[in-house]
Image: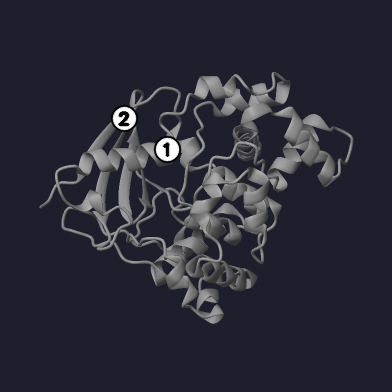
């Protein structure tokens, strides 16, 4: 039985559960005391202790996006680099929090959610995920993405040292915290571009199917170069994404923030709109433009981070 590659990261001021469970990404599941998910064709299991995050590489596809993890003597180094980037372990959280406005709503959000980090995700997966998010709750987005990966993604072989992991979204409400699923890589743009709209609709994405298909064809053909957006100013990158059918400002800003780390992107969904209205504009009904101007000027150089703290805070407060 081949042992899993293991790495450990000393951490301070890091809340793994808040980070992975705050609606930034949709392929992480709490299984017992560990978080399991797929990154670039690699299946990881993460655990947090008071002083560290430990990770096990459980399996990889035959053609992973980062093949260095599957062979050779540098598995640990590559696994470490991949996770360090995704989890943003090198971010200076105290310095980021110090840039937030010193007002009552942000103090409450930081007190409730301190340790939450922004992830840095793969742009294609992030784009598809947030196109699927339109008018959907997080659990529904997870179900769509799970079906998309199972039907069109490359399977991750399960060895005798790894449990079989088969996602069953229909039973998720029965076992909300313990999910078993078989690992699948996220499908490539080329793979989805070859699908029909009807095939995509079998993943329960409804009216979003033609939007996913159009995005896949744009990326697969090179009409939209996602890697190029890293180098563009936020406004230009946003415009490039919004050229896609079905991508409005909120979806574009989610991708810019969670895949590209553009801190001047401030996604406003129903939760953030509610937070801004209740906390900053009580007894008023600000327009979308007013909220946009306020977000652009009030939250400082790490506005995107502040947005995620507000988003998670209002959701935690409602569920609590």
Residue 82 is left or right of residue 211, and the answer is left
Which quadrant of the view contains residue 104? top right
Q: Residue at x 33, y 66 (%)?
A: 154
The residue nearer to you, when weighing 211 against 6, is 211
Residue 291 is left or right of residue 242, and the answer is right
Residue found at the very far right of the displayed protein = 284
Image quarter where the C terminus lies is top right
Instruction: Report helix, strand or loop for mark 2.
Output: strand
| Numbered circle sitting on residue 26 | none
For the residues labelled 2 and 1, say whether their Cβ atoms are less than 8 Å apart.
yes
Name the residue beneath numbered marker 2: 9
Is 282 above or below relative to 169? above
Which quadrant of the view contains residue 62? bottom left
The residue nearer to you, when weighing 244 against 114, is 244
Residue 11 is left or right of residue 141, and the answer is left
Residue 298 is left or right of residue 34, and the answer is right
CA–CA distance between discs 2 and 1?
11 Å
Name the residue beneath numbered marker 1: 87
Instruction: Of the two numbered discs 2 and 1 on the same chain, state the one appearing first in sequence.
Output: 2
Question: Is residue 33 among the parts visible in the rendering?
Answer: no
- Image spot of residue 119 (x, y percent): 48, 40
Q: Residue at x 60, y 48 (%)?
A: 254
- Image spot of residue 149 (x, y percent): 42, 65
């Amino acid at each position: 039985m081949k042992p899993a590659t293991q790495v450990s990261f000393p951490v301070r001021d890091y809340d793994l559960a808040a980070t992975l469970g705050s609606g930034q990404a949709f392929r992480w599941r709490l299984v017992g005391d560990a978080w399991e998910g797929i990154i670039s064709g690699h299946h990881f299991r993460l655990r947090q202790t008071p002083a560290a995050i430990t990770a096990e590489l459980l399996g990889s596809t035959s053609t992973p996006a980062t093949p260095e993890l599957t062979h050779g003597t540098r598995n640990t180094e590559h696994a470490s680099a991949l996770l360090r980037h995704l989890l943003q372990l090198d971010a200076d959280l105290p310095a980021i929090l110090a840039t937030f406005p010193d007002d009552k709503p942000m103090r409450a959000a930081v007190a409730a959610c301190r340790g939450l980090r922004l992830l840095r995700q793969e742009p294609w997966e992030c784009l598809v995920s947030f196109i699927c998010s339109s008018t959907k709750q997080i659990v529904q987005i997870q179900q769509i993405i799970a079906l998309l990966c199972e039907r069109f993604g490359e399977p991750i072989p399960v060895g005798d040292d790894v449990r079989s992991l088969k996602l069953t979204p229909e039973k998720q409400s029965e076992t909300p915290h313990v999910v078993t699923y078989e690992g699948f890589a996220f499908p490539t743009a080329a793979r989805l571009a070859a699908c029909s709209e009807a095939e995509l609709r079998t993943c329960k994405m409804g009216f979003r199917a033609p939007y996913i298909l159009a995005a896949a064809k744009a990326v697969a053909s090179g009409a939209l170069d996602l890697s190029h957006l890293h180098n563009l100013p936020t406004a230009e990158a946003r415009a490039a994404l919004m050229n896609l059918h079905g991508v409005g400002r909120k979806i574009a800003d989610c991708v810019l923030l969670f895949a590209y780390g553009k801190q001047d992107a401030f996604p406003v969904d129903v939760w953030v709109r509610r937070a801004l209205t209740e906390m900053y504009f009580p007894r008023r009904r600000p327009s979308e433009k007013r909220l946009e101007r306020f977000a652009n000027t009030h939250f400082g150089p790490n506005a995107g981070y502040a947005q995620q703290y507000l988003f998670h805070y209002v959701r935690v407060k409602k569920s609590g």
